[in-house]
Image: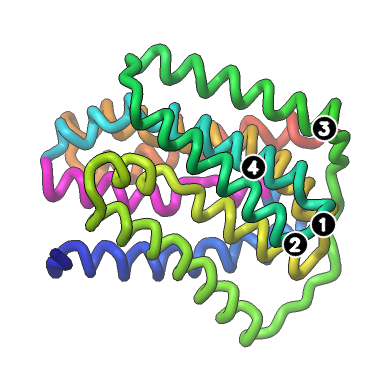
Amino acid sequence: MLTPLILSRTLLSFLIAGVWISFATLAGEKFGSRLGGLITNLPSNIVVSLLFIALTKGTSFAAETASSVPLGMAISVSFVVVFSAFLPLGIFPSIVGSLTVWFVLGYLGSSIRIGPMESLLIYLGVCIGGFLVMECILKIPSVPKGKIHYNLRNQVLRALFAGSVVAGAVLIAQVSPPQVTGIAASFPAVMLSTLTILYLSQGMEFSRATAKILVLSSSNIIVYVYVTAYLYPRVGLVLGTFLAFLAAIGWSALFIPISRKIK
């Protein structure tokens, strides 16, 4: 049933994700794939998700969700790697192929029970392995800033597209059966919309270069959820969210000198 709370969460996700991804893709075009990839994966939709979970089911329940996030992010990283590998074939085969892999892995992931430490180790292995595949096998180079095609109409269209993708994933997660909800909750809507927008505006190489940075910067989400898991029960939602976001920004800043050394 679509309650006012579910509808408000969906609308808020639409607005936040739309504005955020529109800004992040523009920043990527202006500053290059390295910085753009770091900005894109700063917490956005996860902020809304954890806040609503905490409001509806309590801070303790929200804190417990942190243990399952690394596995979901590992599946999302796999999605990004497959998306990049298929992109030379065109945007449609890339989307279909990567989503197929995501759905298969998502189903398998929701069918097994693993502990928090195993979930984190799986994420770390997939993240490092995925980056090495993109760096050493796919040989995806970083790309400097591109030609910016800025106008208000383009930015509004980006916001509408990105917001719709994210809000759709949020809505499905709210009204689906538990097994499907677990899959939908980790849907890489931000990554999909970002990479698609950059492919259409800047071309294949820019999109793939940003994807490579997205693999590493996905760790921002892990940092954010772990910090909220610790702080929500202790300092409350508002201060916990603020401090967790600062922690994610600080973690992302550590990657700036590292990203400059990536080819």
State which mark lies toward you, 3 or 1.
1
Mark 1 is on which residue type?
Met
Mark 3 Cα-neighbour bin, 10 Å: few <14, some 14–19, many ≥20? few
Cα distance between the residues tagged 1 and 4:
14 Å
State which mark lies toward you, 4 or 3.
4
In this picture, is 233 found above or below 242?
A: above
Dot 3: element: loop
Dot 4: element: helix
Which image quarter holds the N terminus? Answer: bottom left
Q: Which residue is mark 2?
A: 199
Q: Residue at x 68, y 28 (%)?
A: 130
Mark 4 is on which residue type?
Val
What are the residue bounds of the magenta stretch? 37-57
Marks 1 and 2: in contact by CB < 8 Å?
Answer: yes
Q: Which residue is mark 3?
A: 262
Residue 211 figure quarter: top right
Q: Is residue 67 left or right of residue 238?
A: right
Mark 3 is on which residue type?
Ile
